[in-house]
Image (cartoon, rainbow, N blue to C red):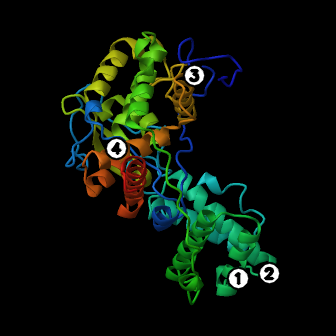
Amino acid sequence: MTTPDDQAASPTTGDPTAGDLTAGGPTADDATTTDQAASDQTLGAQMAGDSAPRRGHATARGEVAPAAPRPSATGVGRKSRSGAGRSATGGIGGKRQADAPAPSTTAGMHEHLPPGLRDAVDDFARYLAAERNRSVHTVRAYIGDVVSLLDHAAAGGADAPADLTLPILRGWLARRRAAGDARTSLARHAAAARTFTAWAKREGRIETDPGQRLASPKAHRDLPTVLRADQAETLVTAPSGRADAAGLRDRLVLELLYGTGIRVSELCGLDLGDVDRMRRVVRVVGKGNKERSVPYGLPADEALTAWLRHGRPALEAANSGSALLLGARGGRLQAGAARRIVDAYARATGLPHTSPHDLRHSAATHLLEGGADLRSVQELLGHASLSSTQIYTHVSIERLRSAYEQAHPRA
């Protein structure tokens, strides 16, 4: 594995974050979607966690209630912060003023459009950020799809939202299909178009909403990659022999990803004040700026103690702020660095390519196999819709079927 500086690094000899940009700024997480419904139905459940009791997962009725304001056991209060997974509105639950400038995510994307369409894109972006409270990544995804649609419409002579018709929308989707877009992408495009035209109708920019009659291609949902419990155990304990700061951090990264099932952006966005040591709960800010509390187990707590006592002080720098996890240069650990950490230890232990999201998938599957109910797993993972969580029931059924076919004499 090489760092961005082309310096060799390995789980036993180096820090996979060396040379990584670790300070500030949101980073791309799991695939963002252009509509929550589209996310639930077309992009599948892209999160998971393990319920192995040894790692201290929540029980079938795990503690997953939304977090209430509380003092932190670490003594560090929660403040507005930059980092992965933060909203474009600037703060938890913040709202962008109606007359605020359009998000910078639209810059360079729509200047070529006719003025009437360009202004609509700016206003739609403001709506997404202020009224829908979407993250900067989600706004970017929406705008990318909408600009693609309006490009197609403008090529046919449209210069305002009122010119959009159902044939234009269908022609755009057909063009995207001919370009080779996957069914999941086509469903996402359709969801973005419907959201845009519904907004335009409410705003009085169009008389009828053509998006109401725009059908989405049925998305194919691949089953997520899931490690066996013994493989996950091997991976998570791989850094245990290291006592250096990077090794202590890596151990905590793996313990939290698998032990809680949180997203990599949620992990990297954790501040010291988000950790409740007394209750063994981390407070995370997920998609849509929604907060939730997720319990963690004793192994993760031990890793956290070692990191806070010996690892973090060794890496702490002027740019560390209140970030829980730090990179090689002392800034907040970024999602790309966390992904390299996971993959480096997977390869070192002989496992196939493994991502933080694979650990999330594994955690969710193991929770269900361990007896957790679907609703509790949904809350733990931060899924807006139960349909996103249900994919893990299919994973468990497939694993059960495989075991049956191998072991039952009448299979």
Q: Nearer the viewer, mark 3 or mark 1?
A: 3
Tell me what residue is drawn at x 53 percent, y 28 percent.
346
According to the picture, the residue beneath numbered tag 3 turns out to be 16
**Which secondary structure, mark 1?**
helix
Q: Amino acid at mark 2?
A: Gly
Picture quadrant of residue 233: top left
Give me the disc on residue 156. Answer: 2
Is the residue 35 above or below the residue 268 in the image? below
According to the picture, the residue beneath numbered tag 1 turns out to be 168
Q: Amino acid at mark 3?
A: Pro
Q: CA distance from mark 3 to mark 4?
A: 28 Å
Q: CA distance from mark 2 to mark 1?
A: 9 Å
Q: Earlier in the sequence, mark 2 or mark 4?
A: 2
| Residue projecting furthest to the bottom | 207
Is the residue 260 above or below the residue 123 in the image? above
Q: Do tag 3 and tag 4 residues touch (Cβ < 8 Å)?
A: no
Give me the disc on residue 130. Answer: none
Where is the N terminus found, in terms of image quarters? top right
